[in-house]
């Protein structure tokens, strides 16, 4: 009986979170125009950094190129300059067939950037990224956050603001923690989807505080992940360290499936990245 009494508040919170999820699953409106003044975009929030990609090249004071590695998302990363371009006010990250003559045996290569060690933000915070992307079999564009610290994965948490697969008409928004890695991801659900127009620019956002991760698309709430166990850091490891952003045009992997090389090239285009902190 004592155990049931102790669990009852947690169950109520979980049911409330599930009800909130149901209310959040409405279609995301298409965005036609970018926010004119980012400093006044969100009441109660203060702009602390914005990347508008207004120059002619990548700002290396804020960004580094993603390196290749063994994980699915980084398996095809390449430092080739043509995969990462700043043009006409946007960042363009490409996935292409490996050019003839390039000393690279992989069938395709991709571009990605991250702000690790250069630009990060701690909660309570809000991050907005306005982006569009192509669709193709095996293309997996992503906008996501990782701890800007030495905390190993997944102990420090991961926040996936947007992932898209193949020709889907939805975006995936997910958190990863030690608890979700063990499969304890039903109460509360660690992932949600929302309808999008992938051909249009959409603004993908996350607000993270000491008690909740709130995802949005075009400023409309889509999915949330609450802190249910204050005594369990492995359930909500997001409150004590800063996070940096990764923008990656990814190809292939166990989730997205095989790559159709005939559908390349593809592009992930980023209009802006903006970090906000809560006004005191």
Image: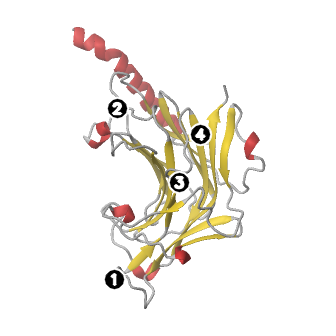
Tell me: residue 156, above or below residue 201. above
Helix, strand or loop status at disc 3 = loop
Residue at the right extreme, as displayed: 36
Q: Which mark is residue 235?
A: 2
Q: Disc 2 to disc 1, how far (Cα)?
A: 41 Å
Q: CA distance from mark 3 to mark 4?
A: 16 Å
Residue 158, how many percent across, how many down?
41, 45
Q: Quadrant of the C terminus?
A: top right
Mark nearer the N terminus (3 vs 1)? 1
Residue in front for this viewpoint, 8 or 111: 111
Residue at the spot of label 3: 115
Number of the front mark, 3 or 2? 3
Q: Of callouts 3 and 4, which one flags the residue occurring earlier in the amino acid sequence? A: 3
Q: Earlier in the sequence, mark 4 or mark 1?
A: 1
Residue 59, percent from left and from top: 62, 62
The picture places residue 264, in percent across and down from the top left corner, at: 47, 79
Q: CA distance from mark 3 to mark 2?
A: 26 Å
Of the residues under marks 2 and 1, which one precedes in the sequence?
A: 1
Residue drawn 60% across the image and 42% down it: 220
Using the rendered view, name the quadrant where residue 187 is placed: top left
| Tag 1 residue | 105
Q: Is residue 152 left or right of residue 242?
A: left
Which residue in the structure is indicated by mark 4? 126
| Crowd around label 4: few <14 · some 14–19 · many ≥20 (10 Å) | many
Rendered position, 235 above or below 144 = above
Image spot of residue 202 (x, y percent): 61, 55
Q: Earlier in the sequence, mark 3 or mark 2?
A: 3
């Amino acid at each position: 009986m004592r155990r049931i009494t102790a669990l009852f508040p947690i169950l109520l919170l979980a049911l409330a979170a599930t009800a909130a999820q149901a209310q959040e699953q409405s279609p995301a409106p298409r965005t036609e125009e970018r926010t004119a003044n980012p400093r006044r975009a969100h009441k109660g929030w203060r702009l602390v950094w914005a990347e508008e990609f207004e120059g002619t090249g990548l700002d290396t004071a804020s960004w580094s190129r993603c390196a290749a590695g063994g994980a699915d998302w980084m398996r095809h990363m390449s430092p080739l300059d043509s995969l990462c371009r700043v043009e006409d006010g946007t960042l363009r990250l490409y996935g292409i067939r490996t050019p003839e003559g390039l000393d690279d045996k992989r069938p395709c290569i991709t571009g990605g950037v991250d702000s690790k060690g250069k630009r990060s933000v701690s909660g309570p915070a809000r991050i907005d990224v306005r982006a569009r992307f192509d669709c193709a079999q095996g293309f997996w564009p992503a906008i996501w956050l990782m701890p800007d610290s030495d905390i190993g994965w997944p102990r420090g948490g991961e926040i996936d603001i947007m992932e898209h697969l193949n020709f889907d008409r939805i975006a995936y928004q997910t958190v990863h923690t030690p608890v979700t890695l063990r499969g304890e991801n039903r109460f509360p659900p660690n992932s949600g989807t929302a309808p999008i127009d992938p051909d249009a620019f959409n603004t993908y956002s996350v607000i993270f505080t000491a008690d909740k991760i709130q995802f949005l698309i075009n400023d409309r709430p889509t999915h949330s992940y609450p802190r249910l166990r204050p005594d369990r850091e492995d359930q909500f490891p997001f409150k004590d360290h800063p996070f940096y952003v990764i923008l990656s045009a990814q190809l292939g992997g166990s989730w997205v499936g095989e790559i159709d090389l005939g559908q390349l090239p593809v592009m992930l285009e980023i209009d802006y990245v903006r970090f906000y902190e809560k006004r005191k």
